[in-house]
Image (cartoon, grey):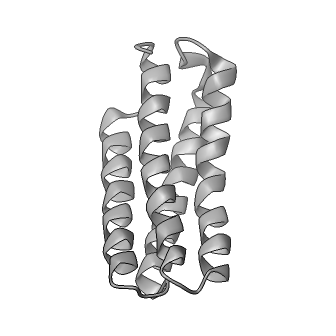
Amino acid sequence: MSGAYSGWLIGAALLLALISLITAIRNRPMGLVLLAGLALIEVALLVQAGIAVARLSEVKQETATFIGYLAGTVVIPPAAVWWGKAERTRWGPGVIVVAGFTVAVMTGRLLQLWNGTA
């Protein structure tokens, strides 16, 4: 895994969380901007997962934990879309806030596991 790619992904997830927080504070439902942001994050996570699976032998420690985190990060954005669209109040974007922050933290943890600094 590339530190630069992971850094970009963490920044994008946190930016999505911030935009979602502003949307929730303004008491607006989830819109097209948040859906597009989640789609972008999901594509980036799938690319990261593909690269990581191809180079899985380079994981320095706790391979099972690494695979669990990798699978978890890929599942979060679709779950957030499903839950956010079901909740048509300010809590829909609130779900996206939590999802964006969770993806950022889990990606940071993946990077730690990859480098063996955990």
Residue at 36%, 79% (x, y): give it. Answer: 23
Q: Is residue 3 left or right of residue 47?
A: left
Res. 66 in view: yes
Residue at 45%, 57% (x, y): give it. Answer: 100
Give 26 or 67, whichever is nearer the viewer: 26
Which of the image's four quarters has the N terminus? top left
Horizontal and vertical percent position of residue 55: 57, 27
Residue at 38%, 41% (x, y): give it. Answer: 6
Q: Residue 50 is drawn in which quadrant? A: top right
Res. 1 in view: no
Which of the image's four quarters has the C terminus? top left
- In this rendering, the answer to whether 4 lies above or below 97 is above
- In this rendering, the answer to whether 14 lies above or below 104 is below
Horizontal and vertical percent position of residue 3: 33, 33
Horizontal and vertical percent position of residue 101: 42, 51
Q: Residue 86 is drawn in which quadrant? A: bottom right
Give 46 or 108, whichever is nearer the viewer: 108
- In this rendering, the answer to whether 23 lies above or below 68 is below
